[in-house]
Image (cartoon, rainbow, N blue to C red):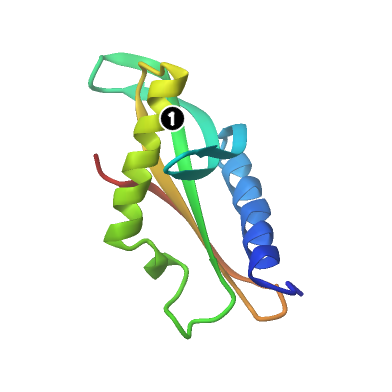
Amino acid sequence: MPANRKATGQLGEEIAVRTLREAGLFIVERNWRCPVGELDIVAEESGPDYASGVSDAVWLVLVEVRTRSSTARGNARQAFTPRKQAKLREVAGHYLQEKGWRGPWRIDAVAVQLERDGREVSVEHIRYAVGG
């Protein structure tokens, strides 16, 4: 049972990592920080890049995890507010610049809904959760 908000968030991130790995993504790093915010998970995935015509490109996938153990303030999916999405775009820009990434990329989200005792209710991987 998660004892506090931080423990709930850490449990949600572990569940998200497992979910992403099961979906075929490779985890590059976790909890990357810059002056304007944090990326929970940075991953890579192979797939077509229709913009460049490359059939098997490496995509950089920046992932935000939202975990809820109650629905009193909305469920995990509802935590991806327009304000949060704008912040993710800003942090993504910093990451891309620092790393010099020039390939395809996207921002995904993983919404983890738990019971109060920490048992999983649902896990949803939302690809392209934040538009550019």
- The type of residue carrying mark 1 is Tyr
Q: Residue at x 46, y 45 (%)?
A: 37
Q: Residue at x 64, y 79 (%)?
A: 115
103 relative to 71, above or below: above
Q: Is residue 13 left or right of residue 92?
A: right
101 relative to 41, above or below: above
Measured as percent of width and height from the top left, residue 109 is found at 44, 51
Measured as percent of width and height from the top left, residue 44 is found at 51, 28
Quadrant housing the C terminus:
top left
- Secondary structure of the residue carrying tag 1 is helix
Q: Residue at x 30, y 59 (%)?
A: 83
Q: Residue furthest front?
A: 35
Q: Which residue is mark 1?
A: 95
47 relative to 62, above or below: above
Q: Nearer the viewer, residue 41 or 33?
A: 33
Measured as percent of width and height from the top left, residue 102 is found at 35, 16
Q: Is residue 81 left or right of residue 44?
A: left
Q: Nearer the viewer, residue 2 or 37?
A: 37
Q: Residue furthest bottom?
A: 72
